[in-house]
Image (cartoon, helix red, strand yellow):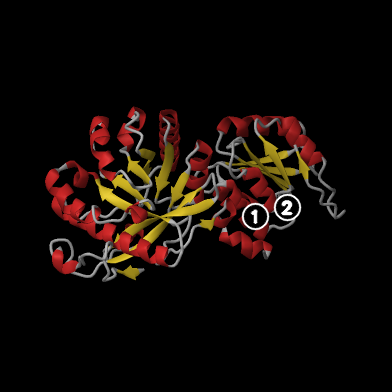
Amino acid sequence: MTVEPKFSATGQRSIGAEESPAVAPHAFAYSFRPIWDCKMNVILIYLCQPITGETEAAAYKFCSVKDNEEENALLDRRVLLHCAGHMQELHRNGQRLLLGVPLHFSTLAHSRTWNLFNDAFRGITQKVLRDMVFIVHDLGEVPDIRLVQELPKLAGSRHVLCTIERSKLNEVRSAGSIIHALGFELAENEPDEIKLNGQIKSMASSVIKTGYEPFLLAVANTSCALHAMAAGVRYLEGPVIHPMVADPHCAKTHKLEHLYPQHRAVSGK
Amino acid sequence: MSKGAKTVLIADDDDLILASCKFSLERKGYRVLLAAHGGEALAQIGLQPVDAVFLDILMPHQEGLETLIEMRRQFPDIPIFVMTGGWRGSGPDFLSIAQKFGASGIIRKPLTPAAMINLIEGLPQKGTGDSTTKSA
């Protein structure tokens, strides 16, 4: 887990807690959630996760600051700047990977919140932005046309991933070429695994049909991971896939057998 | 059922597969135990001697690969045949991983009782030390 660094993304300004007191009176810490591309057997994207001092399980969730869109936009900005700073450090050391930046849809959707975010976003260099993947969440009942309108604001980034509501699983339609992948985040305690597996299958099928890649976040057990893989889900993230990392510094090979560390203990390999 | 009948444990979340395999194997004189997921299979195998296990990979609650590792740890000598119909496209092949994890043999679904019986009949008699891996 890392504490937010003092350096800025652009080197032109320094944005710290004192500039966004509404977001965090306490110090923020960050960790990164490795996202496994199970078709390419690689972890290339690390999703930045602001840690708010809750339990580890609660950390596997997109972070929202109350129900306040402006505060969420400020949180998004802080996470963006943290990622930009980390990316600059990686580039200085000749290291390459992709950083996932979580972003509330509301930040994109209103001029007031977008201006708060864009103030930092426009200062990110093209080189840094190219290695960023935005993961847009909290879409709610947003119609597809709004995605087509708002997501191009993130042009220049490597990819945009969008989380979708499970109630909209059968309504997935094409929402623009900027989107690379669609999926959803699992709850801490999914009550009905059989029903969940059905939802994952349905989501993957709809997303693939629409021409996107399916993803699943916060996967907590191998049963769910295997069902997702069998359904065609390409990107998987969660405690059973790979633990969070404090300081990601390179892409790494990751294979199915890595989900079973106990195998090494049994086989002695 | 004969006194020396072999006991076969089948773990699969598909009721129909369980019922049809049980019917076919019992007709051939085997004693058949059933489990709906890996946790149930581990509980069954801990209660009585089992001569062979057929283990599906895609099961809820506890899937087959995790179960295979645990069975191998607890019962290293029991033949375990792993089966699945899942994912034949690009990417990791569940069955090849099962072989790495110590499966005695692998079966691609659809599963036929004849294939199961071939595998069981091909098992070495207890004490011969033969441990040939077979695939259906």
Q: What's the residue at 73%, 36% (across, down)?
A: B116
Q: Is residue A23 visible?
A: yes
Q: Could you tell me which quadrant the N terminus of chain B lies in?
A: top right
**For mark 1, what is the residue?**
B71
Give the answer, above or below, for where B14 lies relative to B97. Answer: above
Q: Are marks 2 and 1 in contact (CB under 8 Å)?
A: yes
Chain of the residue where label 2 is placed in the rendered structure:
B
Q: Residues within 10 Å of mark 2 (few under 14, many from 20)?
A: some
Of the residues shown, which amino acid type is indicated by label 1?
A: Met
CA–CA distance between discs 2 and 1?
A: 8 Å
- The foreground one among B83 and A259 is A259
Q: Position of residue B79 (x, y in %)?
A: 74, 49
Mark 1 element type:
helix
Q: Is residue A110 left or right of residue B79?
A: left
**For mark 2, what is the residue?**
B78
Q: What's the residue at 30%, 38% (across, down)?
A: A165
Q: Could you tell me which quadrant the C terminus of chain B lies in?
A: top right
Q: Mark 2 or mark 1: name the one nearer the start of the chain.
A: 1
Q: Position of residue A163 (x, y in %)?
A: 33, 42
Q: What's the residue at 44%, 35% (across, down)?
A: A204
Query: Residue A198 is drawn in which quadrant?
Result: top left
Chain of the residue where label 1 is placed in the rendered structure:
B
Of the residues shown, which amino acid type is indicated by label 2?
A: Ile
Mark 2 element type:
loop
Q: Position of residue A265 (x, y in %)?
A: 62, 65
Q: Residue furthest right?
A: B128
Q: Is residue A261 left or right of residue B7?
A: left
